[in-house]
Amino acid sequence: MSSAFRITNRSISQSAMAGLQANLGRMQKLNEQLSSGRQVNRPSDSPVATSSAMQFRSQLRQTEQYARNAQDGISWLGAIDDTLTTMLGSGGRVRQLILTGLNATSGPAEREALAAEVDTLRSSLLDTANSTYLNRPLFAGTADVGAAYDRVTGSFLGNTGDEASAGAVGKVERSVAPGVTLRVNLTGPEIFGDQGAGDDLFAVLERVSTNLRAGDTAALSEDLASLDGRMEVVLNQLAKVGARYHQVETMRNRAENNLITLTSGLSEVEDIDMPKTIVDLQLQEVAYKAALSATAKVIQPSLLDFLR
């Protein structure tokens, strides 16, 4: 059994207008994508793609922070490296002065000149030990102080902690990857020695100056051995800084590579294929013009049009 439906001008007009509106909607969407450069401009465009984009953006923010942390750590370690290298040069000069003072032909005037230069080098080393990074003393640990060492007495003003204990005071650490935290600083006692034992670098230099003026060659020989011991510690710490620098740099490079991968993934989810979108828009424009032409031919004047 067949059924017949009455086709009226109104139904034809409504159908034609619905088709034209749908075509305009597709054109508007393509125009929006071209103007924004993204195929997902709101969650309703694609809930799945929106969820993926949110995850990508969250990971991007985390990875960017890891990269910034690693770069800050590299700057910390680079400043320490430069400082310790400078100190090794000054320590080498003090050693030369001690050897000169051990020469039996050195008179009181010569020894006084040598001691004065040692005093100057000690003062210079104290200034170097008070080097800062971003207005923060390099070797003061986490203490809120203006300098790591007292400029006059050479007393340590910062804090330190047990290297083996996690979260010890004095450690400056940076999180450079998920679950990876690296230490990027050294404290004064780790480099220059424990002042409580009386064998720190500045105490040794003070003794060198005193013994040079007194002409005590036996004491100067002991001072030379103490100085060599302290310079060996500085050299070992410099090697440790270099190893940490390489480690942090590796983590930074890994974070930067991850950023490239994540950015590419986000682009795949959100960004449009420009040539394809342009072609699709042109096809929609052609289809819209064809629909307008066809609608003009289908919707003919009705009886009411003639009665007007």
Image (spheres, grey):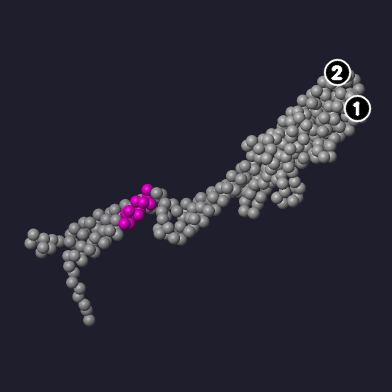
* SS type, badge 1: helix
Q: Position of residue 68 (x, y in %)?
A: 59, 44
Q: Residues within 10 Å of mark 1 (few under 14, many from 20)?
A: some
Q: Which mark is residue 109?
A: 2
Residue at the image point whose x is 48% and y is 55% from the top: 53
Residue at the image point whose x is 51% and y is 50% from the top: 263
**Horizontally, is 165 left or right of 256 in the view?**
right
Give the distance between the C-alpha atoms of the residues marked 1 and 2, in whole angstroms: 16 Å
The answer to whether one can see residue 288 in this image is yes
Q: Residues within 10 Å of mark 2 (few under 14, many from 20)?
A: few
Whether 136 is drawn above or below 179: the answer is above
Quadrant assignment, res 289: bottom left
Residue 250 part of the magenta segment = no
**Horizontally, is 83 left or right of 56 in the view?**
right
Mark count: 2
Quadrant assignment, res 233: top right
Residue at the image point whose x is 59% and y is 46% from the top: 67
Quadrant of the frame with the N terminus = bottom left
State the predominant SS element of the stretch in magenta. helix
User: First in sequence: mark 1 or mark 2?
Assistant: 2
Residue at the image point whose x is 57% and y is 47% from the top: 65
What residue range appears in magenta? 25-35
Q: Position of residue 182 (x, y in %)?
A: 67, 48
Q: Position of residue 199 (x, y in %)?
A: 83, 37
The answer to whether one can see residue 261 in this image is no
Which one is nearer the viewer's eye here, 140 or 5?
A: 140
- Looking at the rendered structure, the kind of residue marked 2 is Ala
Q: Position of residue 40 (x, y in %)?
A: 42, 55
Quadrant assignment, res 80: top right
Report the residue marked by disc 1. Answer: 217
* SS type, badge 2: helix
